[in-house]
Amino acid sequence: MEQKDKIIRPETILKIENLGVNINSELAELRPTISADGNILFFICENHPYNTKYNSIRNSQDIWCSFRDTTTGKWSEAMHMEYPLNTYHYNAVYWISPDNNRILIRNAFVDGDYAGNGVSMSYLKKNGSWSKPQMLQIKNYQKYDRGRQNGASMAHDGQTLLLYMSEEKGGYNNDIYVCFLEPDGTWTEPKSLGKKINLTKYNEMTPYLAADGETLYFSSDRPGGLGDNDIWMTKRLDKSWQKWSEPVNLGAPINTEDWDAFFTLDAGGEYAYMSTHLNGYGASDIVRVKLLEKEKPNPVVLVSGNVYNKKTGKPLSASLVYETLPDGTIAGNGISNPEDGAFKIVLPYDKNYSIRASADKFFAISENLSLDSLVKAGYKEIHKDLYLVPIEIGQVVRLNNVFFDFDKWDLRPESYVELDRVVKLLQENPAIEIEMSAHTDSRGADDYNFKLSDNRARSVMEYILSKGIAPTRITSKGYGETMPVAPNDTDENRQLNRRVEFKIVKN
């Protein structure tokens, strides 16, 4: 019987793409770190003549950077990063934040001075340079980092740190640990990811947590691989960070008979970036590979925008925080660019979020994103600007995260997170007095709209008074449809007119 040709489906073919001569050379390029938007790439190059004190350090490793042209897709010629990112030690970037304004780097530094093993954070400054790195304060870190290797990465939420190291003095077999950001800015003691990830007598290293916060990729020499270390994938099953799905080997061509590690993704989860020794320009090259569906993380939403002063319209440098509603649990953090106020954050589906900026002497107009109602059609990008209102007499603050059911004035529980911020403002500024107002669109009778808005404003005021604020400091008023902020000609405009806000009447 004649044998039929085997059908090869396009979705089962993995293509390795070398990033080209602007990045790769005859030297070893290693440890790629890609930004969430896929447009900034940090990596290390060994033994380059431009490297810091190249001639005095065997196998010198310095940080290099390249930018992707969003029109052509081509990468710029890689540039060597200067001090304070590159020093007389082995240097590397472990993580770049989704907002592109923070990077996590190798080693512990104090004001840019080397202080031993650990990890440090550097921030983008207004002039485009990077600040002197400052070490992260990790409880009992030295107890766990006693081996020959160490490294780290961070989740896109900015509050989950992954480390690999060995507790055995001089040991080569690493385990993977997790630490969490504390309210005071320190980090919790390293916690092992458990026995399913950290197998005894094997080397688990270079963890990368995808943008969904659940899918973990790591390198290991455990049984079942193709060669030395291979890339494996697993899913976090709960919040304990101890329960994981059975790790799966990603197979060829991602894994080879050689040593495979340093696996990283952009937020879209479509392309993985890694270093390989095969078929390159030199000892090791940076490549990207388009993943199969079974190897991708869950889709996420990339939210970008700018932070502005509501009064002046000028951009602001600010901290960002996003919380899940209705519980108000902090889900992540960010910062806006010091020059233009630009920010980016990554949000997993299945939840509702409140997003706001924060800066001294300003009150945030928070925004909400209801991602639990969106179908997981795949990776999405959304633009949403954030505004900060100066705490001054006459300034009006819209409360976007105050919710009522249709035709009712009882507060829904997800409103409490927003209103507690107003309570905090009044507690921290005892001279401030405010007027709380509610507004409707033009649909419905005038008398009905006045009554509905007046009752809603009163409900908000009563909640704030229930928190101990003096009745002399807050009044309420319903304005019905008399103060529109947009024409009542579309659903979008009518939604803008249906609002709760407060005005500072005394400061």
Image (cartoon, rainbow, N blue to C red):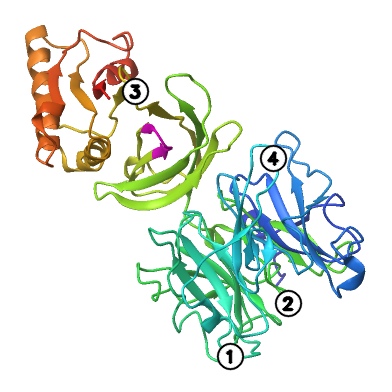
Real-space CA distance between mark 1 and mark 2, rounded to the nearest whole angstrom: 22 Å
The answer, for residue 134, to whether it is visible in the render is: yes
Real-space CA distance between mark 3 and mark 4, rounded to the nearest whole angstrom: 32 Å
Quarter of the image with the N terminus in it: bottom right
**Residue type, numbered disc 3:** Glu
Q: Which residue is mark 1?
A: 168
Report helix, strand or loop for mark 1. loop
Report helix, strand or loop for mark 2. loop
The mark that comes first in sequence, 1 or 4, is 4
* Percent position of residue 458, x then y: 9, 26
**Residue type, numbered disc 1:** Glu
Q: Is residue 358 magenta?
A: yes
Real-space CA distance between mark 2 and mark 3, rounded to the nearest whole angstrom: 60 Å
Asked if labels 2 and 1 touch by Cβ distance under 8 angstroms, the answer is: no
Q: Residue at x 89, y 57 (%)?
A: 50
Q: Which residue is mark 2?
A: 259
Quarter of the image with the C terminus in it: top left
Q: Which residue is mark 3?
A: 392
